Image: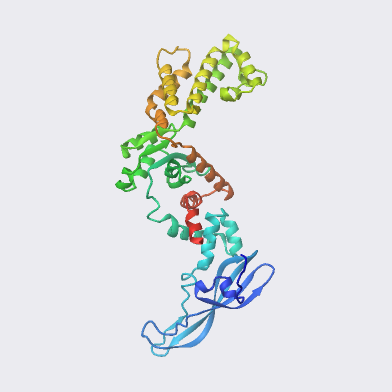
């Protein structure tokens, strides 16, 4: 700002009291709090029952938590006149609904600040309550209700969704009650390259019926607009998607395909370990020492790691591990190819090889082959649907884990779903645009 223009200091404007139809008439500042004495701008001296004129009877003070300025919690002391109607005797006080709803304890601008702190700055409710100088329950109830009204209940929130991801999520680690929920993620911005994924919905439970009911609750027009569903290997999600979204393409995430191959590699390594040594892996056992190296992509192996792999497979007792490791590397290489058509061809070759004339001794590979053949269409669909992955779904799951850790756990699932939607529902751009 080269040539700023300064106006007369005005505490009413600085503290945004003019938006609440209030005027600041005094202040009291201590080291721990700030109190602003205010009065309404509107007289409100006529009776709403008979239309008669009211005379001043006395004054009362209404206290409201306000957005903090600096490090001190700010409280509004609104001095209200009480009137008595000269005609019918009715008694009322000045209207302050512009400042806060009836019986509310937080002003409208304070509530707006708290919602932004929760969604944009990722503050916990405890921190927000401390900055507003109210109880945790007061802050939590008010902020969740405002977030539900302003953001979560927005009818346009589900518009424009064409690609979704689905996954399970553990919302609490207790022995009582169902600890799983099914999360539905909007992957459309990722697919179109316009933004990041966002949490769309969260349904209690983890099953085919839960996901199916979550889809059934949405309008038919919305379901018909879904083109792609990204998911893991859980067959329940696959069946529910096929029944409720018959025109959508199911895509099995590459991470889970590689994980299936990695699990097969671990299983055969443990089995061969037991067969050759008679005990579980120990620090000096070759197979145990190479357990992490076996999961490293061949193109990323260092010289030392390549020598370790070569020395390991020089032992004829480890032939089954070598064959499984080769299949694992082929699957990884298929996903790392530059050209998708080539990657699809390589992965199709692996699936065909695992389901044709495979030796019966390779139990783990035969099981892997049956799984990949059953989900072959979903696995290969990744190569025809660019930018479709369940990776962003897993990323949002990680953000929800962080949220639960910051809040030291949740006991109320309704509160947890609301907090998760505010945390990862993609509302930050909405609030930023309102700031401008």
Q: For the N terminus, give its image quadrant.
A: bottom right
Residue furthest out toward the right: 31
> Residue 5, percent across and down?
60, 72
Residue positioned 55% across, 48% down in the render: 403
Q: Which of 299 and 316 lies nearest the eye of the viewer?
A: 299
- Image coloring type: rainbow
Name the side, left or right, on which 326 lies relative to 70.
Answer: left
Judged from this view, the residue extending furthest toward the bottom is 86
Q: Nearer the viewer, residue 343 or 79?
A: 343
**Up/down of 232 relative to 120, above or below:** above
Residue at horizontal 54 percent and vertical 45 percent from the top? 399
Residue reaching furthest top? 316
Image position, residue 242 (x, y; %): 33, 35
Q: Answer left or right for 172 relative to 88.
A: right
Residue 31 seen from this side = yes
Residue lying at the far front in this picture: please name it.
2
Q: Position of residue 187 (x, y in %)?
A: 43, 42
Residue sitting nearer the eye, 370 or 193: 193
Q: Is residue 140 above or below residue 258?
A: below
Q: Residue at 47% across / 17% down in the picture?
A: 363
Quarter of the image holding residue 318?
top right
The mark total stands at 0
In which quadrant of the rendered view does residue 12 lie?
bottom right
> What is the x, y in percent for residue 251?
40, 33
The answer to whether residue 281 is seen in the rendering is: no
In this picture, is 280 found above or below 314? below
């Amino acid at each position: 700002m080269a040539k700023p223009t300064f106006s007369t200091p005005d505490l009413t404007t600085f503290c945004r009291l003019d938006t609440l139809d209030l005027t600041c008439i005094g202040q009291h500042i201590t080291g721990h709090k700030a109190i602003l004495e205010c009065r309404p701008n509107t007289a409100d001296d006529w009776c709403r029952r008979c239309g008669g004129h009211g005379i001043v009877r006395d004054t009362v003070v209404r206290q409201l938590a306000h957005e903090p300025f600096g490090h001190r919690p700010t409280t509004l002391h609104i001095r209200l006149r009480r009137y008595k109607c000269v005609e019918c005797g009715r008694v009322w006080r000045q209207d302050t609904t512009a400042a806060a709803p009836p019986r509310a304890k937080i002003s409208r601008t304070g509530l707006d600040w708290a919602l932004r702190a929760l969604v944009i700055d990722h503050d916990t409710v405890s921190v927000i309550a401390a900055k507003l100088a109210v109880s945790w329950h007061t802050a939590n109830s008010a902020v969740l209700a405002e977030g539900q009204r302003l953001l979560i209940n927005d009818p346009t929130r589900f518009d424009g969704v064409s690609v979704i991801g689905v996954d399970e999520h553990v919302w609490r680690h207790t022995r009582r009650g169902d600890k799983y929920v099914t999360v539905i993620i909007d992957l459309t911005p990722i697919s179109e390259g316009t933004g990041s994924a966002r949490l769309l919905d969260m349904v209690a439970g983890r099953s085919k019926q839960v996901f199916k009911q979550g889809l059934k609750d949405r309008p038919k027009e919305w379901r018909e607009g879904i083109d792609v569903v990204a998911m893991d290997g859980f067959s329940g999600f696959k069946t529910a998607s096929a029944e409720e979204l018959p025109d959508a393409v199911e895509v099995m995430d590459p991470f889970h395909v590689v994980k299936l191959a990695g699990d097969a590699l671990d299983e055969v390594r443990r089995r061969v370990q037991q067969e050759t040594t008679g005990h579980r892996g120990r620090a000096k056992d070759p197979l145990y020492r190479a357990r992490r190296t076996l999961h490293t992509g061949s193109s990323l192996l260092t010289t030392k790691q390549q020598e370790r792999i070569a020395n390991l497979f020089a032992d004829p007792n480890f032939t089954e591990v070598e064959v499984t490791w080769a299949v694992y590397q082929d699957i990884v290489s298929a996903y790392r190819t530059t050209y998708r058509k080539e990657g699809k061809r390589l992965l199709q070759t692996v699936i065909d090889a695992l389901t044709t004339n495979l030796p019966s001794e390779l139990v783990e590979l035969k099981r892997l082959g049956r799984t990949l053949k059953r989900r072959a269409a979903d696995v290969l669909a990744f190569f025809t649907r660019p930018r479709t992955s369940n990776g962003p779904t897993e990323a949002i799951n990680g953000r929800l884990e962080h949220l639960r850790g910051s809040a030291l756990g949740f006991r109320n699932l309704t509160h947890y779903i609301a907090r998760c939607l505010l945390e990862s529902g993609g509302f930050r751009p909405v609030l930023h645009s309102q700031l401008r």
